[in-house]
Image (cartoon, rainbow, N blue to C red):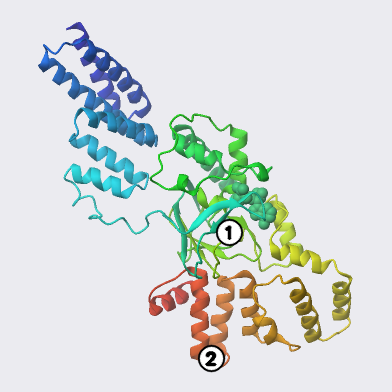
Amino acid sequence: MAEEEYIQQLRSKATELFLREEWKDSIDAYSNLISHCTHHQQQLSLHHPDHLQKLHKSLCIALCNRAEARSRLRDFHCALQDCDRALQIDASHFKTLLCKGKILLCLNRYSMALECFKAALLDSQAGFHGKPPELAEYIGAVEIRKSDISGRGLFATKNIDAGSLILITRAIVMERSILAGKDLSEDAQLAMWKNFIQKVSEFARKCYKTRDLIGMLSIGEDEEELEIPDIDLFRPENVGNVDSCEMIDMEKLLAILDVNSLTEDAVSANVLRKNNDSYGVGLWLLPSFINHSCCPNSRRLHVGDYLIVHASKDLKAGEEITFAYLDPLSPLSKRREMSMTWGIQCKCKRCRFENEVFTKQEIKEIEIGLERGMDVGGVVYKLEEHMKRLKAYRSDRSMKRWGRRIPAMDAVVDSVVDVVGGDHRLLKIMVEELKKNGGGGSGLVGMEKALKLARDVYGKVVKKQAMKTLVEFCVGD
Ligand SMILES: C[S@@+](CC[C@H](N)C(=O)[O-])C[C@H]1O[C@@H](n2cnc3c(N)ncnc32)[C@H](O)[C@@H]1O
């Protein structure tokens, strides 16, 4: 009986802490209560069925409340274990089913969450009526492989059309700051990064699955030695390896964040909000395997905490998926300068090509010739010859069009698109040209071209009218 009174005391204390939302202390108090209940349960004989039943009920509620407290601290995996233990005692415990469903939603495991809500007879109120929400996590036909650029990279396993979705993934952590003017002050930036680092570090400490996955990311050194993880590890259904408890030290975590965090305002990123008044930084796991290229073939779109990656060029099965970390519309010298701030010496095929061309004596001669008034058509012709010899570019369609003439604006845009893929600045030039002179030829053809480029920039939009509105919204004045 004394034990029962003691258990009652532990229960009151834990409940009080829980109601006061002191999550960490309430977890400790519930852990104490759970171990006493478990111990007492073993001592009670079957001759006391009423006591045993009461004890089971207490244990079930304690486990459920500890799960809730743990989930408030984002320790989702331990919380799920508590739910499962509680459901072993009472498979239809309403509060536990609800708690488990909510945790599964946080982990983007929608169909399992739905099963819980169904079991709690809550599915019609759960908000998605058997259909996963619009922004469910999505991993297209891709895998992680060894890259010729550096370390590991993300590769297409099937042909992927320009505009098609490659990934939708939610940030592990995202931190935003409100922009007072155009730029963020140094202090505000510092505060944002500090909060961001703290949040990632806390998340990594509490959730072993996330910790394991973050631990696989590059610190920007010795990438050739890094293990190549299976893409399935990044699917929401994967629960991770419970036995793994290796912590990531702060130095390594900072290096990982330095190399892999992405900001919303970066090149190759679009935030679908006009007059954007906030600035965000986040860590997305799978996109962290995408290498940079100055002739990229994919783009990023930020929607809330989600990162959407779509192809901005047609991709062949086996081709590496890349996006631009730095502005691909800049010349080689500027790109070199910018890549230094990323701590990389770019090894993409465009840099390799341009490095080779620009070190050539011939190019120096062209440059001198240009200064002395040599005709531009001749320069273009000489450059084309180099390109053909090195086979560095995807198509020579645009080269044929250039010939020895100074190209028209739409031919220049076409050629640049060939290299850098969809870019909203090129789309803007194209739309402006269209408005100015009806699109160089038939306005209809021009519009079709602009819509095709818009698909590369914003991804596939099913309805033409919707794409026109999107272009108007994003690149119109
Ligand atoms: C976000 S990670 C990309 C994935 C990384 N390769 C890996 O194995 O995990 C960024 C790091 O990849 C390498 N990297 C990415 N693009 C590169 C490029 N174009 N040239 C050289 N290194 C690159 C750099 O070490 C960079 O710090």
**Relative to 287, residue 455 above or below:** below
| Residue 186 visible to the viewer | no
**Relative to 230, residue 423 above or below:** below
* Residue at far bottom of view: 441
- Amino acid residing under circle 1: Ala
Query: Mark 2 — residue?
Result: 438
Residue drawn at x 74%, y 58% is: 337
Residue drawn at x 45%, y 47% is: 232
Residue 20 left/right relative to 203: left
Residue 37 left/right relative to 397: left
Q: Position of residue 386 (x, y in %)?
A: 78, 75
Between residue 61 and residue 53, name the one nearer to us: 53
Quarter assignment of residue 207: top left
* Residue at far top of view: 2
**Relative to 241, residue 423 above or below:** below
Residue drawn at x 29%, y 49% is: 111
Q: Position of residue 302 (x, y in %)?
A: 47, 59
Earlier-in-chain disc, 1 versus 2: 1
Q: Position of residue 300 (x, y in %)?
A: 52, 61
Query: Mark 1 — residue?
Result: 266
- Amino acid residing under circle 2: Gly
Between residue 368 and residue 396, name the one nearer to us: 396
Report how far apart the C-alphas of labels 1 and 2 lie in the structure.
32 Å
